[in-house]
Image (cartoon, grey):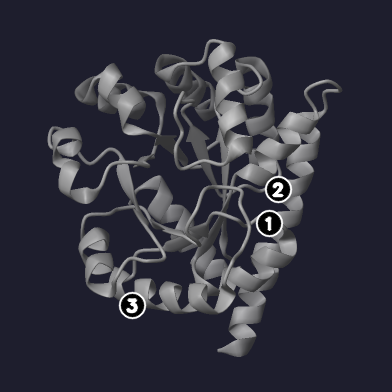
Amino acid sequence: MSRIADTFETLRRRGEKALVGFVTAGDPDLSQSIKIVKEMCSAGLDVLELGVPFSDPTADGPVIQRSSARAIKAGTNMRAVLDMTARIREFSSVPIVIFSYYNPILAYGAREFYRDAVEAGADGVLVVDLPPEESDELTGAWGDGLDFIRLVAPTTPPERMAQIAARATGFIYLVSMTGVTGSGGLDLEELATVAAELKNACSGLPVCIGFGISTPQQVETIGPMGDGIVIGSAFERLVESCLETGGAPRRVADLVSELKRATTDSAKSAACVS
């Protein structure tokens, strides 16, 4: 069983939802980024999404766009992200998903990326702009050392959900709304319908919901719809707010603690409803 699958199974037995946290690797620099991640893991994070900074992050809102720009300016590239993954693995067993656009992986080399990611201790990869029909050129030469996390949009029809789920491992990432990360406008009724359709199509694969979720109250409301919640912009917003004063690791850890408590409360609410 992979580290990701084991984590979701453990959470299921405990009656908890997963807190999946995204941060851009190397923001504001590699040293501070490692400190932030260490505090997040200690505060109760269940799965870490480690973002590869990219110059054209089209799916991301302005907060994460700026975090990518800062990380690139600080010298963070794919090799640095994989080195950071290895350093994180020295102090934490939290599953690590490398979150990237396709271009940085293509430039690094598909075989080389797989080899080095597995060696560094990564558990999965999510490629934002690579649909299933085009992914064989990347994954065809890979073994089973990395889970491949797939994205499903709120506009995806059920039959395509099933096709995507059949080629996914680890978990499915349900984008909660159209638009970019960090934006608002969640339609909870529509999201509940889409999440139920996806759960039905997944044949037991965990579903994590992200985009536009940033508060414990939203986590409590949306948590029962899936198996986990993905949060990124809220963490990066805190990092950005501490650029001049410092203190980002502690503030981000405090938010992790609040959000993790909310995932537990959401699981209790779901049990009461059922």
Foreground mark, 3 or 1, reads 3
Check the image and report above or below for 261 versus 132: below
Amino acid of disc 1: Lys
Q: Are marks 2 and 1 in contact (CB under 8 Å)?
A: yes
User: Nearest the camera: 100 or 250?
Assistant: 100
Report the disc number at residue 256. 2
User: Earlier along the polypeptide chain: callout 3 or callout 1?
Assistant: 3
Q: State the CA–CA distance, disc 3 to disc 1.
A: 26 Å
**Quadrant in the rendering for residue 97:** top left
Tell me the quarter of the image containing the C terminus.
bottom right
Q: Residue at x 53, y 16 (%)?
A: 72
Q: Which mark is residue 248?
A: none
The three-letter code of the residue at mark 3 reads Asn
Residue named by callout 1: 260
> What amino acid does circle 2 point to?
Val
Q: Is residue 9 above or below residue 148?
A: below
In percent of width and height, residue 65 lies at: 56, 32
Tell me if mark 2 has few (under 14), some (14-19) or many (20+) residues whose alpha carbon lies within 10 angstroms of its own.
Answer: many
Q: CA distance from mark 2 to mark 1?
A: 6 Å
What SS does tag 3 mark? helix
Residue at the spot 26% in from the left edge and 24% down from the top edge: 106
- Along the horizontal axis of the image, is 157 left or right of 96? left
Residue 130: give x, y in percent of width and height.
28, 42
User: Badge 1, how many Cα within 10 Å: few under 14, some, many 20+?
Assistant: many
- Judging by the rendered image, the residue that carries numbered circle 3 is 200
The location of residue 11, given as percent across then percent down, is: 53, 62
* Nearest to N terminus: mark 3 or mark 2: 3
How many angstroms separate mark 3 from mark 2 (CA)? 29 Å
Give the x, y percent position of residue 149: 35, 49
